[in-house]
Amino acid sequence: MSTLAQLPGTDAAADGSVADQLEPLLTTLFEEPPPVEFEFWDGSTFGERRRGQIRFRSPDVLRRILWSPDELGISRAYVAGEIDATGNVAELLRALQQAIGVGGTSRLKVAAEAARAFRVGGAFGAPPPVPAEEILPRGIRHSVQRDRQVVSHHYDVGNDFYELVLGSAMTYSCARFASTGMTLAEAQAAKHELICRKLGLDAVRAEGPRRRLLDVGCGWGTMAIHAATEHDVDVVGVTISAEQAAYARRRVAELGVEDRVDIRVQDYREISDGPFDAISSIGMAEHVGKKRMPLYFDRLYDLLTPGGRLLNHAISSVGGSRLGRRSFVYRYVFPDGELLDVGDTVRYMESAGFEVRDVENLREHYAETLRRWVANLEDRWDTAVDLVGEARARVWLLYMSGSVNGFEDAGLQLNQTLGVRLHDGGRSDMPMTRVDWG
């Protein structure tokens, strides 16, 4: 007859290693021995170290999972340093995803084995405090005030840290590796050049002032500077991150283009000095939210002159997705983030009045971009920890590594969608072919 004294973690089971006591749960989760070795706080192991190692440093990991039996519990343990990973984190995550077999296993059996496993080493008890890097935003979703709070959480962590991760281009969006051997900076410049060409920034104005570009969500100003210096246009760049704006203004001043680039701390809903000849929205739509996308595209349409073009560069997913409040990415990276199906993006743009002229998917380019960012972070890990602390550095490593897999397996997409505001009578001013877009 089974009694509490016979359960793992009690005196009767104390002679067995942690791996021995967790084996019933682990063999339930994994149909075959995983290609990743799990090492526990007593030195015992489970699995094979072919793709790397994951080390559980204390029973606190199990306490977190017991209280948060979803990805949030184990994510908190990783951010807090209670879990260590040896090897390529993206490959580790991919290997675990492929090896886990709970889809064909009775959830009741998993729960029963988990109930036993959580008694290992006295794992019952309250979990440690939630890492300070976690956020659960308050207020009306996607209101101006809440959007500022969310953007500050993600972007106002220090420009030095972003320089370390993003490199000299200081561009936090998918690059375009147009040829082999490109550096990250070259690939980011190629992406900006492609956008400028799609927007027709080189079109000749017969008379009057230079053409005007609005860059919504301008980040650290790289797109604005590229457009001004390479295509001789006037640019208004808007961001609601104060740190981004300060950095972008400094770069603009250093390059001597203050007469052509105006960087503002301003929400897109507050822009009132149109019209513009072109609008770039690069990595911005993910922050807007599906319910507000019609308003977003309506607003941008109103800010364009007839014949003006909008380039919307955004992560998407088939069917769209809204981050769950208990997901790692929601709590630590992009609170309130939402991805649209590209079909919905096209539909909302058309409903606002745009004629959609082109859609291009660059997802493989984003996987490579992320690999470069991960390499930058890992190569200067100690400096990154000095800048933002180990917990936040771990957030970024886990987030970017997981995203590599998302773009590689097509769970995530990166679409550039080009629309034009037609003249009365239907004239578009668009070129007859894509040849000039590069």
Image: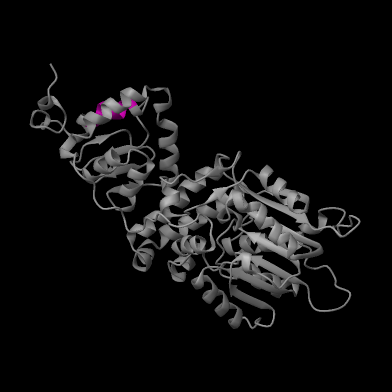
Please state, as top left, top right, bottom left or bottom right, where the C terminus lies in the image. bottom right
Quarter residue 135 falls in = bottom left
User: In the orientation shown, which residue stands out farthest toward the top?
Assistant: 1
Q: Is residue 266 above or below residue 183?
A: below
Residue nearest the viewer, comparing 184 with 232? 232
User: In the orientation shown, which residue stands out farthest toward the right?
Assistant: 425
Q: Could you tell me which residue is drawn at 27 percent across and 49 percent down? A: 82
In-image side of 423 versus 211 (left or right): right
| Residue 62 in picture, x, y percent from top left | 25, 40
| Residue 329 in picture, x, y percent from top left | 45, 49
| Residue 176 in picture, x, y percent from top left | 64, 56
Q: Is residue 2 above or below residue 19?
A: above
Q: Is residue 341 above or below residue 303?
A: above
Residue nearest the viewer, comparing 423 with 234? 423
Q: Could you tell me which residue is drawn at 40 percent across and 36 percent down? A: 96
Residue 149 can be seen, yes or no? yes
Magenta segment main secondary structure: helix
Query: Does residue 389 show up magenta in the picture?
Result: no
Residues rendered magenta in the picture: 22-28
Q: Could you tell me which residue is drawn at 57 percent across and 78 percent down? A: 249
User: In the orientation shown, which residue stands out farthest toward the left?
Assistant: 11
Residue 179 can be seen, yes or no? no
In-image side of 181 versus 370 (left or right): right
Quarter residue 94 falls in = top left
